[in-house]
Every structure is written in C-alpha cells, then in structure tokens.
Image (cartoon, rainbow, N blue to C red):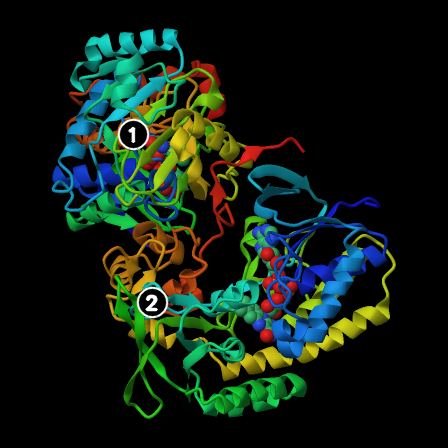
Amino acid sequence: MATARVVIVGAGPAGVRCAETLLAAGIKPILIDENRRDGGQIYRRQPQGFTRDYTTLYGSEAAKARDLHESFDRLRGAIDYRPDTLVWNLTPGQLCCASQGRHSTVDYDALILCTGATDRLMPIEGWQLAGTYSLGGAQIALKNQAVSIGHRVVFMGSGPLLYLVASQYVKAGAEVAAVLDTSPLSLRLKALPKLLARPGLLFTGIKLLAQLYRARVAVHLGIKPLQVMGDAANGVGGVRFTAGNGRTVTVQADAVALGYHLRPETQLGDLAGCTMAFDQASSQWWLATDDAGRTSVKGVYAAGDGSKIRGADAAEHAGRLVALALLEDLQQPVDAGLRDEQQQALAVMDQFRLGLAQAFPWPSEQAKALPDSAIVCRCEMISAGELRRTVNEKGACEVNRAKAFSRVGMGRCQGRYCSQAGAEVIAAEAGVPVQEVGRQRGQAPVKPLSMLTEEVSS
Amino acid sequence: MSVQKADVVIVGGGLMGSATAFFLRRRGQSVILLERDQIGQYASGVNFGNVRRQGRFLGQLALANRSWELWKRLPELIDDDLEFIPSGHMRVCYREDEVAELEAYAAAPEAAQLDLKIYRGAELHRRFGFLGPDVKGGSYAPHDGHANPRLAAPAFARAAIRLGAQIEERTEVAEVQKVGADFHVTTTDGRQFQAAQLLITAGAWGQKLSAQFGEPVPLDTHGPQMAVTEPVPYALPTVIGVYTKIPEEVIYFRQIPRGNIVIGGGYRSKPDMLNRRAYVEPRSIINQINQMRRLLPGVGNLNIIRVWSGIEGYLPDSLPVMGPSGTVDGLFYAFGFCGHGFQLGPGVGDVMAELLGTGSTSTPIESFSITRFALPAEQRSQAS
Ligand SMILES: Cc1cc2nc3c(=O)[nH]c(=O)nc-3n(C[C@H](O)[C@H](O)[C@H](O)COP(=O)(O)OP(=O)(O)OC[C@H]3O[C@@H](n4cnc5c(N)ncnc54)[C@H](O)[C@@H]3O)c2cc1C
Ligand SMILES: Cc1cc2nc3c(=O)[nH]c(=O)nc-3n(C[C@H](O)[C@H](O)[C@H](O)COP(=O)(O)OP(=O)(O)OC[C@H]3O[C@@H](n4cnc5c(N)ncnc54)[C@H](O)[C@@H]3O)c2cc1C
C-alpha cells in the first residue's frame, strides 16, 4: 500500500497533528472538516474578517492555538484539505461527503477519525424553553460570532467547561448570574491526587475560579438542578435549584448554559462497525481502541476527543501517535522516540482524565429524580413519563427498543443530546446499571442532509 | 428439560406471527410463539407503514380487504393505537400509457371495494397541487392509508399475551420435525416445544424451516430503503407512490401528523443475513432525494434526518407463501411477503387462525400455496 489513500476526518488538534506527522513521513492525507476553517472545537478560528487577537480568543491557551494554526497553515498547501465538507455516511472503503449542497464520495484505504466531542447533557424540567443552550453552544456563540446567549446568564452543570465558559463570558463583559455545579467540593478534594498529574492545568482551573469570585459571580457547589423557569412565550426566566445546604434557591436569568463535560462523536466509527466499549469512569460508551488508536476494524483509526475524552493537549499527542500507528501498519519506518514521547504524555493525561471524572461526575442520579413531565428528547418533545411508560408497559428495557416505541433519539440531533440521558431514565426505571440498557446505534446521516443535495461525479 | 406443549407453536414473531397468535387465542386455541430476537424487530417494525390495497395483485385483494376491515377496527380490536390513519392513497405515474394501466386496474371487478378514482391533467394538479409537473395521472384510493410499523407487532403480541398466549423472545428455533402426530420444535439453547399444529411465520428466514420439511422455496432477500425528514407542518395527509417500471423511479412518501415525511423506494440493498442487518445504500438516498424533488418539488427545503432499511423475503412471482404445507399434515406457512405484508398483517393473522382452527378459510389464498414451488418427487427426497 505504498500509495495508501489516507483520509482524516476532523481538523482539530488531533487531526492537524495527525496530518502533520503523516506528511513528515511522505504521506499526503486528505483532511476533511465540516467547519469552514481549521482548529476544531477549542482552537476554532474566527470567521474571515473578524480580527480579535489570540489572547482575547483563547486566553491561557493562546500560544497553543497559535502554534496549531501556524502548523496547519504550513501544511495546508501540501495536503488535500477539504473544509466545509460533512462526512454524512460511510460504507467500507468509502466516505459519503456533502459540501455546499453537493454529494460526492471519497475512497480510503485508511480512515482516521478525529471527530471531537460535543456537550453531554442531562435534562431538567423546562430545558426546552428558548434561551437554554449547551455550554458548547454558548461558547461557540461567543468565540465565533462574539455574541452572548443572553443578558443575564446562568451556567449550570459540572466539569471544567462550566468554569471556562462562565469566565469567558465574564471577560467578554456579559452578566453571569450564577455558576451552579452539581459536584460537591468533597469530590474535588478526593480527586486531587489524580488531578495533580497535571499541576499546570489544575492551576489554570483554580485561576478560573478565582476570576469568577473576583467578578463577584455567585458559585454554588453540590447543587441539585430543579427547573429552568419561564414560559413558551418569553423563554427562560430563571433557574431553580436546591443548594448544598438543602435550601431551594431561585436565580433570575434570561438564558441558561447547561453541560456535564463531553461525549465523543462516535457515529462514523459506529457506522464503520467499530466495537464500542463502556468507560466506567465517565459512564459512557466510546470507541474501543488500542493505546495507539487502532479500532476493531482494520484500516479504521481514531484519535482525540472523538475516541476518548482527554482534552485538547491529549488530542495533539493522540493525533501524532495514531499517525505513527498507521505508518507502522503500512510497514513504514517509525521514530520510536517520538512515539514514546506521545505515549508518556498521554499516560499522564489519562491520570488527569480519571481525576476529572471523579471530581465532576456525570449526575446519573438526576435521571431518576426527573419529574415525569420533564422533556427528555427536545427534538421530538418526549417526556420522561412517556419514556418510562415504554419501559413499564411495553417492556422496552433497551435503548433502541425504547427509541422505536417512544421516539426518544429519533429527532434531528440523532440522539446526541438525549440518548445518554434517555439511557439513564430507562436504566433507573428498569432497575439495572446503565451499561446494560445498551447504547443508541448510529444511523446515517451523521448530520441532517439537505434534500437539495446534488450528486457530483467524483 | 421439560417439554412445553400447546395446540399451536408459531415460529417467528413479526406481524404475521403476532397477529396469528392473537386471533388463535380469540378462537380459544393455546399458543406458544417463539421469536429469535424481539417481537417485530425486523421487517414488521421497520417498514414504510403503507396500509395500501391498490396496486396489489388482483387475486390478493380479497385478503387485503379482510385485513382492511380489521385495520378499521383498531384501536378497539387490540386495545392499542397503531397510529392508523385511513387518509387516502394516491398512485401516480409519469406516462400516458401508465394512466391507461391504472384505469384498467381500477375497472377490475376485484378492485370494486377500493372505490378508485382516476385523476389526470388539470384536474389532478388542482386536487394535488403540490405534485410536480411530470406527474401525468393517478389513481386515488380514498380508504387506504398508513400506520406506525414500530408499534404494530409488539401491540398484537401484547394483546395476545393478555388473552393468554405464551410468547418467548430471544428464542431461536433450530430444528423442526414431525414425530408421530406432533411437531417437535427444538431451540438453539436446547429447549423443546411440542404441538399438533405448527405455523412458520419466519419472514425472510421462512425457507430455512420449510426446507426442513422438504419444501424449499426460491426465496431471495432485499433491503428496501427508507428515509425521513425533519418535521414540518402537517399538510400532506395522502400517501403518494409512483407507479413505474423503471426501478429508480419508484418512490413513495407519507407525512405523519407530527410533521415528518417518511420516504421509501428506489434501489434496494442486499442484506447481510449473517449479522441480520440490512444496510442503506448511500446512492439510494441520493436517488430518493432526486426522485422526491421530481414528485414533490417543495420538498427541496427539507433535510433527511435518518435513513434505514430492513430485511424482507421475496419470491420470484412477488407473492407470499401462505397456507397449508403440501406434504405434512398440521404444518402451515405464512412468510415471504415480498415488500407488501404490513397492510396484510391483521388479515393474515385472522385467516391463518381460521385455517388452523377450522381446516379451511373463506378468503381465497390458493395462489399463495407453497406447492407452486414443489419439486418433482425425486429431487424432493434429495433436498430433505
Ligand atoms: C465547549 C467546549 C470547550 C472546550 N474547552 C476546552 C478547554 O478549555 N481545554 C481543553 O483542554 N479542552 C477543551 N475542550 C475540549 C476540546 O475542545 C477538545 O479536547 C479538543 O478540541 C479535542 O480535539 P479533537 O481534535 O479531538 O476534536 P475537535 O477539536 O472537536 O475537532 C473535531 C473536528 O472534527 C470535525 N468533524 C466532526 N465530525 C465530522 C464529520 N462527520 N464530518 C466532517 N467533519 C467532522 C469537526 O467539525 C471538528 O472541527 C472543549 C470542548 C468543548 C465542546
Ligand atoms: C424497509 C421495508 C419497507 C416495507 N414497507 C412496507 C409497506 O409500506 N407496506 C407493506 O404492506 N409492507 C411493507 N414491507 C413489508 C412488510 O414489512 C413485511 O412483509 C412484513 O412485515 C412481514 O412480516 P413477517 O412477520 O412475515 O416478517 P418479519 O417481520 O421479518 O418477522 C419474522 C420473524 O421471524 C423471526 N424468526 C426467523 N427465523 C426464526 C427462527 N428460526 N426462530 C425464531 N424466530 C425466527 C425473525 O426474528 C422475525 O422477527 C416493508 C418491508 C421492509 C423491510
């Protein structure tokens, strides 16, 4: 396979470092990304014409962002880069792409999925009201378009992004009404030994918190979300929660950003038939890979947050490492030193990720407490009560079965936002651990496909 | 291990098996239904949902009419809502000679109950203003409609259970044989079931079991291709399908009251029978998009949000295998419904229950007999 056709999906830190490493070894990959520009999620580049500087956009991560962008700019002419191109489906050896209303196919011998992550969400009563966003959505609004999601914003959920996005809002001059974290301080202290694997990052986190306190933002730990208040006509009016001390508290706001860390974008791997594994620490399914990123399907690889949620720095290392694994599989010489370096760095980051999972756990217990009236699937507007009835009355104790009966996960988000929470509701109702109710199978198209799409001969 | 007995053992819990179990219980027969995976998980749960009579083989309309009478009695019949709407079905075509064929079909005495009305030209485009200019004519069936396939077989199975049927999911039948007066049914996990009557409703897998009785049939498998759009305001109650001899022109759609438009047709895929999955062919989705824009030009602004397929069994003459075995007493078949068994489901259940219970049925089903594929005697002994 001297002229192996190598395709990378995703031009974030993982995809860019992967492309760079392959190019250094003489392989010219095709790099596909649905975004108009490179950088992926964290190092998302602003649209042409916007002129905010690196520090404004990326804060403490400015140097890394610049480095990644400059690396990409050097690569760009030498690889086959296809921005604004969605991979909407695949069959063995072939990707289906849609770009500017045109469908085309791209053949591959090796496929490297660097598809990143999206927000992980747990429903709450009232979260379907206009003005409720995911943390990622709130951040994209700011990073991409320099707009805030509201005049007075509550940030609720758990995980590092909660503090990061809240502080970015503060810095941008938005009014942050409160930061409400479901995880208590005690868990963070317990996780400290693991978090100390990356003292620099831990320090960055503490600095974020300090910034919020300095800006006099109310930060509550160990809360239980009760309700996003408001009505259909006016949207979000505020948030009600049980504080750590057991009292019910109401905060007025016209927008809420919600999120519990991240979930990997695994649809393409799933469609390729890759085995998935349940990660106990974060309590979610992701692609089963070896340490270097080989999936169970020959010729299909994965790196970055689309494979394991380990953050942006890990994505860069994993991107290089997966490229080296591919070179090895192609019987090409591999720089062992470079490989060891990536592996050592990733071992430290694995430690840290376990610390994060312990400090900011996924709040599965909330699914049980969710009132019957709360909407689980926002696309199809299906309530927790309806989902529970399919478990009780129709015996649907498996995610795909419950989807067939109730429509949870059938909407345009394809279960991205609801299927994990739906699985928790099903598991709680059936009285079994969540890994036993299965996971929603991936279905094409990965994202909605316009019916104006025309075929182009490739 | 103890042997479980009933009057009838049914192999296969799609719509055919589930509906038959229900009607058998209403006739007081004891029933054990064995389903390899989950009730209605295959064709019966993933089909397009057309409850259409028009366009069928004329000799099948008596059965389809009987089924339609049962669809009309839902949800009372089984105390469950299958989202059946008799919203009308319109079969359209792009050529004048095809209009003539639709006319001939509408004039056939067998189709009398369908109350078909032929539309063409300006009248057609006045009544169905949303259709593209290529549409030359159409046959409107006011009583046909559509339903939600995902709900159908499980609802019939639950109703059967309420009437006392025993239903075993995740139970795969490995071997069937007749020993004396009884059928002995052995599952892959070694369980044993016995009954004086055996019904094979194993869908696309039916011939594997019929072959065990020396009655192989030339059953082929295909995966029809389905897609659905995001919801838009409910405006298209009529199910529309294209009548054509050109495979890629075949397209049909229905809008559900929630607003999504369900689409089917075009190229079919070859299912993976080992892993029991039917895949979607990307080129078929692209073809569907093209054909839909031709049929319903306004659809271009929508997005496809999900696609799927399912495993269906087809016979060379496009007719099912239904009725008594040609060789073994007490053995019955209802499988291989060639892409149009959903509408027939309740009727097949009713007819098969009648046939098993009384030895005959008032609905003509002779043309579906398995004996049409019977091998000469000497080949049969080699095959079994
Ligand atoms: C809101 C938010 C804030 C974050 N903040 C931080 C932070 O401060 N620090 C930190 O360490 N990490 C942070 N992360 C995580 C960080 O974004 C990721 O760790 C990092 O971006 C992972 O890099 P990646 O290359 O794996 O994926 P990404 O950077 O997410 O890149 C994936 C790319 O793949 C493309 N893609 C995906 N699917 C397809 C498809 N089907 N077709 C075409 N293209 C596709 C996407 O468009 C995207 O550009 C944040 C994540 C989010 C969601
Ligand atoms: C995508 C698609 C679209 C369609 N659209 C329409 C439509 O719009 N209108 C219409 O009228 N028809 C339609 N059809 C056809 C219709 O769905 C089928 O004809 C009908 O559902 C067949 O029902 P069944 O019970 O015979 O088969 P199935 O639903 O396939 O059930 C057979 C069952 O037998 C079980 N089984 C097999 N072998 C064994 C064994 N050894 N032991 C135990 N169990 C076994 C299987 O697991 C399966 O559950 C469509 C079909 C497909 C696939």
Residue A289, how many percent across, how many down?
A: 64, 62
At horizontal 46% and vertical 59% (from top left) the residue drawn is A416
Q: Toward the viewer: B233 or A287?
A: B233
Residue A216, how many percent across, how many down?
A: 45, 90
For residue A238, above or below residue B361: below
Name the residue carrying label 1: B239
At horizontal 18% and vertical 43% (from top left) the residue drawn is B30
C-alpha gap between disc 1 and disc 2: 35 Å
User: Is label 2 within 8 A of ligand 1 (CB to nearest ligand atom)?
Assistant: no
For residue B93, above or below residue A273: above
For residue B372, above or below residue A2: above
Residue B114, how many percent across, how many down?
A: 19, 19
Crowd rating for badge 2 (residues with CA inside 10 Å; few <14, some 14–19, many 20+): many
Q: Mark 2: which amino acid? A: Trp
Report helix, strand or loop for mark 1: strand
- The answer to whether any part of residue A322 appears in the image is no
- Determine whether, in the image, residue B176 is placed left or right of residue A59: left
Q: Quadrant of ligand 1?
A: bottom right
> What subunit carries mark 2?
A
Crowd rating for badge 1 (residues with CA inside 10 Å; few <14, some 14–19, many 20+): many
Residue B34, how many percent across, how many down?
A: 32, 45
For residue A248, above or below residue A110: below
User: Dividing the picture into quarters, in which one does residue B19 lie?
Assistant: top left
Report helix, strand or loop for mark 2: loop
Which quadrant does the C terminus of chain A fall into? top right
At horizontal 73% and vertical 66% (from top left) the residue drawn is A68
Q: Mark 1: which amino acid? A: Val
- Determine whether, in the image, residue B213 is placed left or right of residue B269: left
User: Dividing the picture into quarters, in which one does residue A363 lie?
Assistant: bottom left
User: Dividing the picture into quarters, in which one does residue A51 lie?
Assistant: bottom right
Name the residue carrying label 2: A127
